[in-house]
Image (spheres, rainbow, N blue to C red):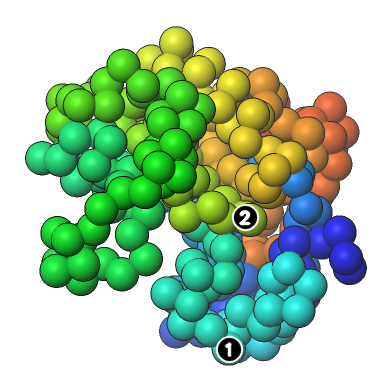
Amino acid sequence: MKDTVLYLQGITVSFDGFRALNDLSLYIERGELRCIIGPNGAGKSTMMDVVTGKTRPDTGKAVFAGDVDLLRLSEPEIVSAGIGRKFQKPTVFEHQSVATNLELAMCSDKSVWSTLIARLSGEERDRIASVLETIGLSEHRKLSAGALSHGQKQWLEIGMLLMQEPQLMLVDEPVAGMTHQETERTAELLVSLAGERSVVVVEHDMEFIRSIARRVTVLHEGGVLAEGDMNAVQNDPKVIEVYLGA
């Protein structure tokens, strides 16, 4: 398991008798880009909720980085351990500049006083500059986040995750509402992030998935229906029947 960054085994989650996850087992390797697809209600969001500590499973194991038992940690402790999550709707500080958003994301102590008195070191300034370059917003560093386009806000939120230096990033429907050009740029960005870290992308846009997919997992009724490269998955009769259609 030394090359496995996330190990889920036998995860079951029930809500009022409904099984959102049903004996789910999933393994994510270090540095890989994994795409997770499936119909609404397949368990994609619940799976991410379990990994980030928002939902506690009824049964199963969730192990991070070889020996970190995620089921024993709180949500903040899971973030500190090295897991970051980006939700579908971007949540940036709209009245702050792009650079300040990244600075706030980096602060380990989020109290108002410590944030006000914080002084950036040269190393921290370099980190912000590097992330701005990665997400393509260097020229907009002084612009208020609220003035960004929808796609740029998504990239800024990805940048805010990167400031926390996660080993594993969970990215939920990153291209919903984006223009074609923004979608292409997002594909390039996510592909570039894998390797140094593991990236799990949940998305419904199949054209986008095809453009970035290395390994794809299909969830259905709370379990893994199929897994493999995009060609194998999209030609799997079970996947065609329950998700992709004729």
Kind of residue sitting beneath label 2: Leu
Quarter-of-image position of residue 42: bottom right
Image location (x, y in percent) of residue 126: 44, 36
Q: Around disc 2, counting alpha carbons within 10 Å, would you say few (fewer than 14), some (14 to 19), or many (20 or more)?
A: many
Q: Residue furthest left?
A: 95
Location of residue 173 with respect to 130 vertically, above or below: below
Residue found 45% across the figure and 12% down from its top: 180
Q: In the drawing, does residue 11 fall left or right of residue 43? A: right
Q: In the drawing, does residue 112 fall left or right of residue 135? A: left
Q: Rounded to the nearest whole Å, what is the CA distance between mark 2 and mark 1? A: 18 Å
Location of residue 16 with respect to 37 vertically, above or below: below
Q: Nearer the viewer, residue 38 or 169?
A: 169
Instruction: Identify the mark nearer the N-term, 2 or 1.
Output: 1
Q: Around disc 1, counting alpha carbons within 10 Å, would you say few (fewer than 14), some (14 to 19), or many (20 or more)?
A: few
Q: Residue furthest front?
A: 122
Q: In the drawing, does residue 57 fall left or right of residue 54? A: right
Say if residue 1 shows up in the picture.
Answer: yes
Secondary structure, mark 2, is strand
Quarter-of-image position of residue 90: top left
In the picture of the structure, the residue carrying the numbered disc 1 is 72
Q: Nearer the viewer, residue 30 or 126?
A: 126
Image location (x, y in percent) of residue 9: 77, 75
Say if residue 89 shows up in the picture.
Answer: no
Residue found 64% across the figure and 62% down from its top: 221
Residue found 33% across the figure and 43% down from its top: 102
In the picture of the structure, the residue carrying the numbered disc 2 is 168
Kind of residue sitting beneath label 1: Arg
Label placed on residue 59: none
Q: Nearer the viewer, residue 236 or 49?
A: 49
Q: Nearer the viewer, residue 24 or 96?
A: 96
